[in-house]
Image: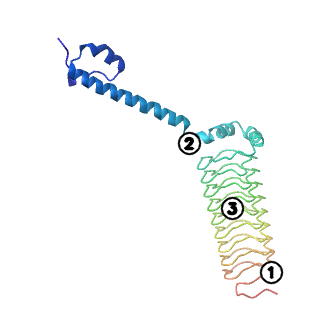
Amino acid sequence: MTRKLTPKRRIKPTLKAIAQNASYLNRDALLELQTIIKQLLEASVREEAGAIVKETQPTITEEIVEPLALLKQGVDVWNEWREQHPGTNLDFKGVDFSGVTLELINLSGVNLELVNLSGADLRGAFLQSANLRGANLYMADLLWVNLQGANLQGTNLQGVDLYKANLSNANLFEANLMQANIRRAKLLQANLEAANLVEADLLEANLMQANLSNADLHKANLESANLIEVNLEGANLLEANFSKANLRRAKLTQTNFHKANSNAAILKGAIMPNGIVYG
């Protein structure tokens, strides 16, 4: 007597079960068996194809897994690897480096767009020409860091320590530098257009020929800063401190200079808010 497939006694969807019970099946059951085998084979093919895609398709994780592993071995290992692979393009977009210690690390030219470096220790790091657009460096330690020519557009640098950092020719358009320590830093020809520098400390900073148009410098400290030929057109200088600053040939048109301290500042050749060139 043949055994008929019923919902209660349906064959388990495994090849072993099928092989053991095939001899007991009638025509209808064999047809159903054929359907089951077909489904199993198709599922197997899809699984194998998915594994192949997973192994061969480039993903962000696979592209950076080796460099990230090197980083975990320490800055010395990383810097040595970079010296041996100078032409390698590195993309760490969106990676979370918050709170890590990367002192003296070489990340020059690396894509660090949208990375999280909040609270990170980057003292003395080399970040020349790095792309940090939209990155979060809130309260990071950037003492002595080299950011020359780096892209920091829209970057959050609130409360960072940039003491004696090199930001010459860097793009800081709309960057947030609120309450940042930028003392004695180099910002020659840097683009700080529309940047937030509220209460930032720029004591003795070198901003020669920098673009600070439409920047917010409310209560910023620029005492003894080098502001020769700086463009401050449309900037908010309310209560800013320019004491002893060098503003030779600076452009101050359409600025809000209300309550700003210009005691002992050098203004020779500067274009004042009223459009008159200072004697």
Residue type at the position of mark 2: Thr
Disc 3 element: loop
The mark closer to the camera, 3 or 2, is 2
The kind of secondary structure element at disc 1 is loop
Spatial CA distance of label 1 from label 2 is: 56 Å
Work out whether residue 5 can be spotted: no
Q: Residues within 10 Å of mark 2 (few under 14, many from 20)?
A: few
Whole-angstrom CA distance, mark 1 to mark 3, is 26 Å
Q: What amino acid type should be assigned to the residue bearing mark 3?
A: Ala
Near mark 3 (Cα within 10 A), the count class, few <14, some 14-19 or many ≥20, is: many
Tell me the kind of residue under disc 1. Leu
Q: Earlier in the sequence, mark 3 or mark 2?
A: 2
Q: Nearer the viewer, residue 189 or 60?
A: 60
Counting from the top left corner in percent of width and height, residue 229 is at: 78, 75
Vertical comparison of 72 with 108: above or below: above
Of 39 and 178, nearer the camera is: 39
Residue marked by disc 3: 180
Q: Quadrant of the N terminus?
A: top left
Where is residue 132 shown, x and y percent of the image?
Answer: 65, 55
Q: Which residue is mark 2?
A: 59
